[in-house]
Amino acid sequence: MKGQITLPAPIADFPWRVVIPLTLLVAFGAAVLHSAAGGSMDPYASSHLIRYGVFLVVALVISYFPREWAGYVAIPAYIAILVLLGAVEVAGQLGGGSQRWLELGFMRLQPSEVMKPGIVLLLAAYFHSLPAAMIGTWRAILVPLGLIALPMAFVLLQPDLGTSLAIAFGGVVVMYLAGIPQKWFIGGAVAAIVATPLLYLFALQPYQQRRVTTFLDPTQDPQGDGYHIIQSQIAIGSGGISGKGFGEGSQSQLDYLPEPHTDFVFATMAEEWGLIGGLFVLLIFGIVLRYGMLVARDAKDRFSRLLAAGLTATIFFYVAVNLLMVMGFAPVVGIPLPFMSHGGSSMMTNMLCVGGLMMVERWNRQTNTVI
Amino acid sequence: MDRKNTSSSLRQTFGRRSFIVGAIQGGIGCLLAARMGYIAVAENEKYTLEAESNRVNLSLIPPRRGWILDRNGSPLASNRADFRVDIIPERVRDPDATVDLLSELLNFSPDETEDLRFRLEESRGFAAVPVANGLEFDKFAAVSVRLPELPGVVPQRGFSRFYPTGASVGHLLGYVGAPSREEYEAEPQPLLLTPGFKMGKDGIEQQFEAELRGIPGARRVEVTASGRIVRDLETRDDVQGDAVQLTIDGPLQDYAARRLGLESGSVVVMDCLTGDLLCMASMPSFDPNSFSDGIGRLEYSMLSENERVPLRNKVLQGLYPPGSTVKPTVGMALLSQGIDPDETVFCGGGLRVGNRVFRCWNRRGHGHTDLGKAIYQSCDVYFYAMAQRTGMWPIAEACKQYGMQQQFDLPVVSQFYGTVPDPDWKLEKYGREWAAFDTVNATIGQGYMLASPLQLAVMATRLATSEMVTPRLLMRNDRPQFASMGVSSEYKTYVRQAMSDVVNGPGTAGRARLPVEDVLMAGKTGTAQVVGLNISDGRSGPWRYRDHGLFIFFAPFDNPRYAGAVVIEHGGGSGAAYPVARDVMTFLLDPQRGLDALHALEAQWGGTAQQRLDRQYAAYAAAQGVDLPPAPPPVTLARQVDAEARAAAAEPDEATTEAVTPRDEANPRSQDSVT
């Protein structure tokens, strides 16, 4: 389209459409983290940028994986992560407490994080191999549910409700997009509504129960559990349209806002950058997620489609739950905001998802050129 | 075929469902944007306010209290810069080293060091741990200089109320303390809840609370969630309260209080020309300095258990039978009834009225006695006889006119009326007719008659001037015009002379003569019996049965300038009172000579009133088994109002008089005072 000007292939093929917005978002996140650290690159902003750089390389490497590799890798990867989850559980038991990560020396690996793209990959491969005629059968439902339930169980044991819900969400979205009959989802939804009170009473830890009741009425405990939600809304609300200015947010600078660099990084940002900053962040997430959905739509085969859509859904889940939480629409669950919150695991998971999307996009282009 | 159809239908399903998923995502995105817009724009004002109230902490700065000054402008109550040191535990790097260094700098005992270490270990967060307060400046400075080695240590200065002469002004000024719940309910202002704010609790401090209080300053600070102050945003200075200047002469007040020594009693001195109250000493007293840091339970119980009621202001709330001090007033009543002062009554040691004999104090009798002799020899029989002639009414009238049963317009918390009995009063009160012995009792200031030391001082002043002098406590520069009491100058001179003879002539109080040249003091002794002679002889035995000693006086006798009264509770008789009056007047006229007398006595008693009070407290505390902090250090400011200051200031004068008046001859060391 650009006439005769042809860029060198590696540059032309480079996924600018996602890397540029992401880099902007991460840079913005680093600025916010700089402020959250009291005006210092350390300890948050610098490591945030370094991690992004490292995982961007990883994502780009992944993007060059051929279509076949992905299919081969799905099952072994799933099994390997399950083993790691088990190892975490065992290490935790031996260590005499709950533990979520394995110490790898250079970083702490949370296997539950890797499971989020992992489950999507596996289910995409499963539905790809499943004959289309069998999509309405029990096999199309029970096997995926089992595949989801297994890692969920491990993660719930840790206990980590947020991550297990994220795994379930990614898996269920893949199942939905794979074409499981609508009635099952309606039935599942009804079952979920019935099960919710039971889960609340029997499955949730007391601190998790408190988070739910607090979410319903934060003012009942303004100094305790409601404190997070109230302070977060104060931060966002007091930012106004254009914010208080970089490094001027009293809520975050004076420690009123809890977790200003992780779960509540959006509130930190909104206080200093206001509605404008908030819309900017939402816009970039919109661009990234739209990119993901377009990649899925353009994908040439069922595996690629489901993989791309599932990865997009995983990122979406992070963004949506985190933002709903900081704005008082969801209970406080420990889910960070992708690309902005400080934290290696979240960055890794989301960059793996992005890498997967770039990979599918590359496949799309290849089939285009082949056809 | 079938599979292909299904496959493409699955693809259609994917397209449809991915659209739904995308729409849900977009929907949630819009919801979030709208929610954020709502919070940040529509509710911006509310949340801005909440963020500000999070961030900004408004605290009041208690105003510096106005000073209370004596008539010469020296402070009776001032504010002492209170140097204190606190530790903010979370900023401390090495607690042990910090404690060790602080203990060294502040000369802590091992106990105090351990105490501090314990407090520091127990503490959490940003709450400051007090290390010491009421520090001397050099210790405070020593800590300040070493601050670089002491992270987390905060030396601060505030103000606390300071009464340089301590117990001497306790009753007069009252004390300050943190507002009680009742006081807050009566005046619900945030200032009353501010830490460090103190309000007047008694005496002048309470009466002039409005003037003395001042206007609080305010400090807006930025604080973190955990309460740590980040920076001052804005500070409005406090406005110090207005000073209140009293007519009290600070050094005289201090001298009188000290001169009362071990006795329980009061001294009032007035200026005859203006009515200014120069001295209203009441002892034993409390140290208002130690009250202003909060009354210790121990101290309070010590004071309230004492039978000499250190918590009562005896000048205003002590009521005593005036005894013979009422005789000059009765004499004025007789003169007003036309009795010739030269007319004599024969005193044979008693007077028979009907079938009863009323005895004179002098059982051997005074012989032929006129009014003058009756006053200076305090002859009871003369007054018995003359009062039978005039009846009670003129005497009661005169007593009231000369100040008894009067309340004066003074800024004090309470003053007692006392009693001047008359036939109507007795009938109403007891339903009994007035009898001859009632008149007999009244003429010698016994029976129902009760007066406060203040009233007796007013009586002395009015006897001296024959003017309706009224006492005043607030310093003013005008000289009030007092109404004449309608006494002829002849009679006025007569009574003055008679009262001078009490001291300077053949009277009852020869040793009250002032050791000051050219100034003669007039006076009248009084001994008020507390119980009948069948219970106690009035001089020995249980303290509470001993007679009160009274003395009213003025000087110089022929041109009175100062007048006053001394009452010694259960002092055993008037002999306990007039030496005090003599020394107080001596101090007023010749400070050094007065102090010499006092120093000799204090050496005998074991220190000044303050020293004795401190020791008494220590002994009491030891008996109760409680450790206590040492007495507060003396402060140079005290020099301005304590008795010693007067002599120091008057030294040039003294040098000149010394040549004229050789020491030996001038003033025999008084051994006459009661112990």
Image (tube, rainbow, N blue to C red):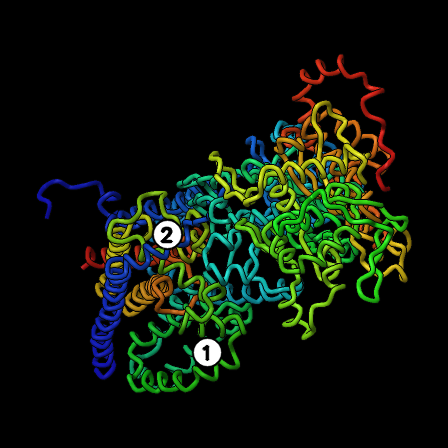
Q: Is mark 1 on a helix, strand or loop?
A: helix
Is B599 situated above or below A313?
A: above
The quadrant of the picture occupied by the C terminus of chain B is top right
- The image quadrant of residue B236 is top left
Circle 1 chain: A
Between A115 and B618, which is closer to the camera in this rendering?
B618
Left or right of A220, for residue A366: left
Is A117 situated above or below A157?
A: above
Left or right of A162, for residue B267: right
Left or right of A166, for residue B443: right
Is B397 situated above or below A5?
A: below
Q: In the drawing, what numbered circle is on residue B52? A: 2
Disc 1 crowd rating (10 Å Cα; few below 14, some 14-19, many 20+) is few
Question: Label 1 is placed on what type of residue?
Answer: Gly
Look at 72% across and 55% down and name the residue there.
B443
Question: Residue B511 at what x, y percent from top left?
Answer: 82, 34
User: Taking the image as drawn, is residue B72 in sight?
Assistant: yes
Q: In the drawing, what numbered circle is on residue A146? A: 1
Between B383 and B567, which is closer to the camera in this rendering?
B383
Look at 72% across and 61% down and name the residue there.
B439
Question: Residue B199 at what x, y percent from top left?
Answer: 55, 50
Question: Residue A109 at what x, y percent from top left?
Answer: 51, 56
Foreground disc of the pair 2, 1: 2
Question: Label 2 is placed on what type of residue?
Answer: Glu
